[in-house]
Image (cartoon, rainbow, N blue to C red):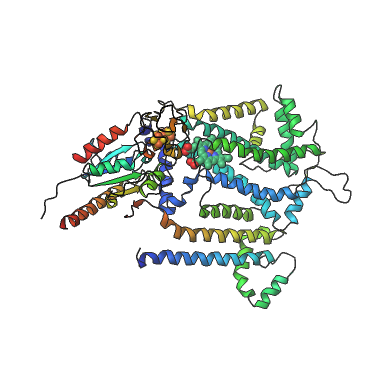
Amino acid sequence: MSARDRFLPIVLVLIFAAGCLGMTFMMPWAEFGLLTPSIPGSDWGKQFADTLGISGLLQPAIAFVNSNFPYLKDDVNAPYYVYGFFMALALISAAIGIAVIGREDAEEKTVLPLK
Amino acid sequence: MVMQKLYTDPLNKATLWLEHWTNVIATSKYNPFYYHGALPQFYLWVLFLSGLLLFAYYIPTIDNAYASERLINAWTSVDYITKTIPFGAVFRGLHRYAGDAMVLTIILHVLRVWFTDRYRQYRWVQWVSGVVLLLAVLFIGQTGYYLVWDERSLLLTRMTVSAFESLPVIGQPLKDWFINGKEITNLTLSNYLFIHIGLSFMLLFGLWVHYVRMARPVLTPPPVINYILVAITLAVVAMFPIQSGTMAQLTQTPTSFEIDWFFLWPYWMMTKMSMGFFWALMIGAVVLFTAVPWFVRTKPVETAEVVLTKCTGCSLCDKDCPYEAIDMVPAPAGSRFKLLATVKSYRCSGCGLCVGACAFDAIDLPNLLDSDVSNQIKAAAQS
Amino acid sequence: MVETKKKTVITLICERAVDLDREMDEKGILKDAPDVTVIKFPCSGMIQPLMIEAALKAGAEGVIVCGCQIGDCYYREGNKMIRERLLGERPPGLKKTVDRRRVVALWLSRLQTKRFISEAKEFVGHLQTLNSITEAK
Ligand code: HEM
Ligand code: SF4
Ligand code: SF4
């Protein structure tokens, strides 16, 4: 494969790997209840995020959760469901990332190796 | 010709087309159609694992008079799993939706083997054992709904009882077995739990029968597909969280319930027709479905034949036969070799893989002999 | 210019793989690539390495082996078996003396007729360059 043919798969793999990592990091935040602020509970996770100075980074995720999971507002399990949801996204990005590389093994033509 | 008919069959054409475009997008390596049997098998493992967690906390009783402080029964134990155990709700959701997904993937599997003509003749054992597996899966799923012991469970139990009671002769014993006595008691739920788990393990036996005539069945999809199967289920868990119904009270008579269309459709049917008609329809449908492989009549498979004088007993054909149709038996007295290949014709598909495996031209398909092939090749090479 | 005498390329193909019925005449010769003759099998798994050797020995220019997409064998594993045999991963394999440049395998579904024709033409061209190299030596 030429360098140009390789370019697109590499970019795709990087995008999906980044997506997978991002979603994986979202998972603990979801479990701390940070992404579902309406849930009563300890706010040690929130303090932790404030200490690290990254609460701002979570704003888009909080907005996403609030707009997509309104029915979880009064559910004690909201953090776990949201954790599961981000795990699903991470798995899908990982799957696509792996498939982009792995699909090269699928063969429609077999050329015999010279002995 | 059967095949000419097959290739003009719209259902077969549609399947081929769908598989072709899936290949274009995902390549053959990740084409889920090529793992049609492995998909439900994978969900079965998901169900076993998530079920193990639920089993650890589940209490199969309808009341517990000795625990005066707090009512401890099936419903409260499920409530405890859902509300108190970290990720309990997620595992419960996973268990429920993986069950639905298993039914869905079984349907996909059945349609594929049916539409691509992979269900008849030497494959009848797979088909018939498959029907039994499907029925068992449906019944296991229904018992899962009884176990929760909310109002729906109570209603389903009563509907099942009246369905059984409507049957002549076997009706009464069936009912007594089902609720484990004359009326609904704590023992009813222990029976439900036993049926649910016991039958789930019986599935493994059923699957053994399903696989026994296939060498190397494809049982695991590649990780990429597994990830996606789990991801879809997890996403559904978050998007449609399970709502527990109210606790069942034997004194009350719930009248309506939400239907899980994968498992509870027979109960929907019961509400639409008389019990007699319901049973006639169900039994008729199962009999028809089981008989599907015998609807198409074609001439029998021309099975492979061993050339006794040439076989060296090397067992390569035995190793490669995809339908376990070859046995190596001791060679007759006086032979130079120890073993001899024999074909169990009732299992043989006439595929010729054994011919491809044999380096001694010692096994042949009667309708396409090695010598015919050689002649065709020579004629073509010299024309 | 050396006069090269016309030789055939033999295609050993599963009757359920790529659809060539409308592409060939009764003798199995492809209309678009008259160098190629097609011989059908119930499954690509029936093809013996011996048959490929026989074809080359009988004077065929090259051999195309063709089965369904890997994963889709009607008889479950036929195409995987012949693929492994060609690659020497499963007995019986090709003899050492077989010129591996003259054998190619394609795994194409029923709808990939165009792809087959173009691969077949490419293979014919590849064999011609092989011939001119050997003749030049
Ligand atoms: C618990 C559900 C089931 C599971 C886990 C399952 C799994 C499998 C697996 C792994 C294979 C082997 C595929 C291969 O390697 O070629 C297979 C083959 C087969 N299954 Fe199922 N199956 C199930 C239900 C069914 C049902 C309900 C039917 C039909 C009523 C069915 C009909 C068949 C047939 C006819 C084959 C043979 C296909 C062939 O020879 O290519 N199965 N199944
Ligand atoms: S591969 Fe051929 S020689 Fe070997 S056991 Fe089978 S029939 Fe006999
Ligand atoms: S033709 Fe040969 S390989 Fe195929 S099922 Fe029959 S015995 Fe097995």
Q: Does the image show residue B9? A: no
Q: Is residue B298 left or right of residue A83?
A: left
Taking the view exactly as shown, the residue that stands out farthest to the top is: B169
Front one among B325 and A89: B325
* Residue A15: percent from left, percent from top: 49, 66
Instruction: Locate residue B78, reporting x and y percent.
Output: 75, 49
Which one is nearer the viewer's eye here, B75 or C92?
Answer: C92
Q: Residue at x 64, y 74 (%)?
A: A55
Could you say where residue C120 lies in the image, as x and y percent from the top left?
27, 49
Give the residue drawn at x 11%, y 53%. C2
Query: In the image, is residue B20 above or below residue A2?
Result: above
Q: Is residue C13 visible?
A: yes
**Which picture quadrant has residue B135?**
top right
Direction from residue B89 to residue B381 in the image, left or right: left
Q: Quadrant of the N terminus of chain B?
A: top left
**Residue C46 place in picture, x, y as percent:** 36, 38
The residue that appears at 61% across and 59% down in the rendered structure is A85
Foreground residue among C24 and B202 = B202
Please give left or right for residue B235 compared with residue C2 in the image.
right
Left or right: B97 as drawn, with respect to C77: right
